Amino acid sequence: MYANRVGSAWEVFAPAKLNLYLEVLGSRADGFHNLESLLLPVRLYDHLQWIPSPSDAGCALDIRGLDGPRSQLPKDNRDNLVLRAAHLLARTAGVPPQGTFQLHKRIPIEAGLGGGSSDAAATLVLANQAWGIGYSIEKLAQLAAELGSDVPFFLARGPAVCRGRGEIVEPIPRLPRLHFVVVKPTESLATAAVFREWKQNFSFLDEKKPSGLSPALQALRKGDLWAAGRWMNNRLQQAASRLSPVVGQVCEFLSELGFAGSAMSGSGTACWGLARSARHARNIARRISNCFAGQVYCISSCSAA
Ligand code: C5P
């Protein structure tokens, strides 16, 4: 993501992400879990703008365009990841936080699509420019990891394999553009609740297969979507389905529609199907929209920067 100047303001388009593969490798002493995951930024964006204000006015956040219940956002704006990111950057760089951040939300909340994390990364990029700080992406990535496990991924500007709790980001070049149908049920899930459920009910099951990540990546690079799709999987899917059975129903439904692969994204509740082309995605999305109460998107992956 890049900050663009618009008159005296700055703007960033903050993409959503899909997890095409997510394996939980085990619990950690810090309460998090070690993961191995393939993430792609996709072309569904929140829009974040920074508008200047007198320097002693502090920092404000204005949120618009939210789909779904507003109660899923922190009640106090100060807990929003945008303001937390802005204050962390200001504190670290020793500059006064200033201006108004205007966030236009389009990415559904608590969907496993990384909207909040992407907004946080966008804030770091935006404020770094607007406040003339000039930190490198590497320095911003250190701050990003303090804000959330997925935040550093969004600074990588392309597909990546993420490890550790998510903050160790290995960019993956040369992936073709991919086309998806993404289905977001009306129900949402909090990430912490899904990991808790996994730990209580699934961590003891030693059913791990050899990692499907390398074969999935090799097949994707060759453009063999069906071979890649066979390796795509999300270890948190069963835990999320226990908390919200509609996730299991949606995943089963998607698996019968002729996609190359399908799974839940992140900790849910959004699920995706990998189509063979944009047209294929549009055709299937139309069929799903006719019989499904939630939101249905046709989305392609962002090309790497
Ligand atoms: O890092 P983030 O704030 O997105 O994580 C939200 C919650 O998800 C954490 O508090 C933790 O309970 C869980 N989590 C985890 N292991 C990870 C990432 C998140 O247990 N790798």
Image: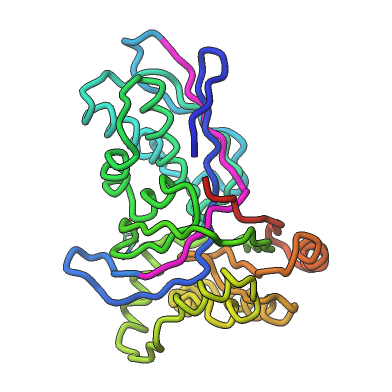
Q: Is residue 30 above or below residue 78?
A: below
Q: Determine the residue located farthest toward the left in the rendered image.
A: 29
| Colour treatment of the image | rainbow
Q: Residue at x 37, y 70 (%)?
A: 36
Horizontal side of 131 relative to 249 (left or right) equals left
237 vs 135, nearest the viewer: 135
Determine the image quadrant of residue 140. Answer: top left
3 vs 9, nearest the viewer: 3
Q: Is residue 222 above or below residue 17?
A: below
Q: Is residue 191 magenta?
A: no
Q: Is residue 41 magenta?
A: yes
Q: Residue at x 37, y 77 (%)?
A: 198
Main secondary structure of the magenta stretch: strand
Q: Ligand 1 sits in which quadrant? A: bottom left
Total numbered badges shown on the rendered structure: 0
What residue range appears in magenta?
36-53
On the image, the x and y values in percent for residue 37 come to 42, 68
Determine the image quadrant of residue 139. Answer: top left
Q: Residue at x 36, y 84 (%)?
A: 202
Horizontal side of 220 relative to 235 (left or right) equals right
129 vs 175, nearest the viewer: 175
Q: Is residue 25 above or below residue 15?
A: below
242 vs 231, nearest the viewer: 231
On the image, the x and y values in percent for residue 35 come to 34, 69
Q: Residue at x 49, y 58 (%)?
A: 173
On the image, the x and y values in percent for residue 204 come to 30, 88
On the image, the x and y values in percent for residue 279 come to 81, 61
